[in-house]
Image: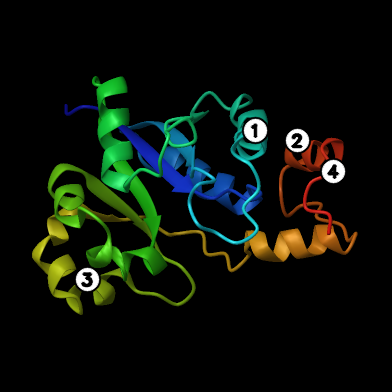
Amino acid sequence: MGKKKIIVFGGCFNPPLNSHFSLAEQIVSEYEDVEKIIFVPVNSKYEKVDLIGNEDRYQMLKRVCDKNKKFKVSRVEIDSNRPLYTVETLEKLQKEYSKYDIAFATGSDNLKKLSEWKKADELVKNFRVFVLERDKDNVDEIIESDEFLKKNKESFIKAKESIRSNLSSTFVRDKISKGKSIRYLTPDDVISYIKEHNLYKK
């Protein structure tokens, strides 16, 4: 039997949504060789409009992950003094969790642009990429239509029966700014944190 896997789930998580955790739970329940999902919020040095501070996004994730023994949140990117390339993040986590094989989860929307990522060759050579289908995307078609992806197709794992969600953090932030309910869009622990710290108010 091979090594167990840890799946790295990166993103802005601005804020984290129920759909993020649903996807993670699905992966853990569908794949017996997946030991844990590690959520990795990006550093706020990353140029993204309306991205709130590192600590708030970390704490929102932590409140949810602390209640699920299969979930963990990492500070590897937010504690870095510069934005890390994805392959650098994975290399650091591979050293930290040397007993496991590290794999990276991403959406099919990102897969289309993967060849343009910094050190994309190293990424697909050294790590498996777990792909979640978004919207009406078809992972196999995306891979076949891109020479870089096609050449490295053994590196990609298509998720079984992906949960598809068009819900975006932008939509949720807009609701908050207008004083509307975000119940059932994000976990109650995240809602409590947002209220306590008065986040996303215009």
Q: Could you say where residue 103 lies in the image, as x and y percent from the top left?
A: 29, 41
Q: Distance between the residues labelled 3 and 1?
A: 34 Å
Q: Residue 189 carries which label?
A: 2
* 164 relative to 145, above or below: above
Image point (16%, 26%), residue name: 1
Along the polypeptide, which appears first: circle 3 or circle 2? 3
Query: Which residue occupies the foreground of this view, 137 or 112?
Result: 112
Q: Which type of secondary structure does the marked residue at label 4 adopt? A: loop
Return the residue found at the far left.
Answer: 151
Q: Could you say where residue 73 lies in the image, as x and y percent from the top left?
A: 51, 31
Q: In this view, does 134 lie to the left or right of 3?
A: right
Question: Residue 49 occupies which quadrant of the picture?
Answer: bottom right
Mark 1 = which residue?
64
Q: Distance between the residues labelled 2 and 1?
A: 7 Å
Query: The disc labelled 2 sits on which kind of residue?
Result: Asp
Query: The disc labelled 4 sits on which kind of residue?
Result: Asn
Query: Which residue occupies the foreground of this view, 86 or 47?
Result: 47
Along the polypeptide, which appears first: circle 3 or circle 4? 3
Query: The disc labelled 1 sits on which kind of residue?
Result: Val
Residue 144 in view: yes
Q: Residues within 10 Å of mark 3 (few under 14, many from 20)?
A: some
Q: Which type of secondary structure does the marked residue at label 2 adopt? A: helix
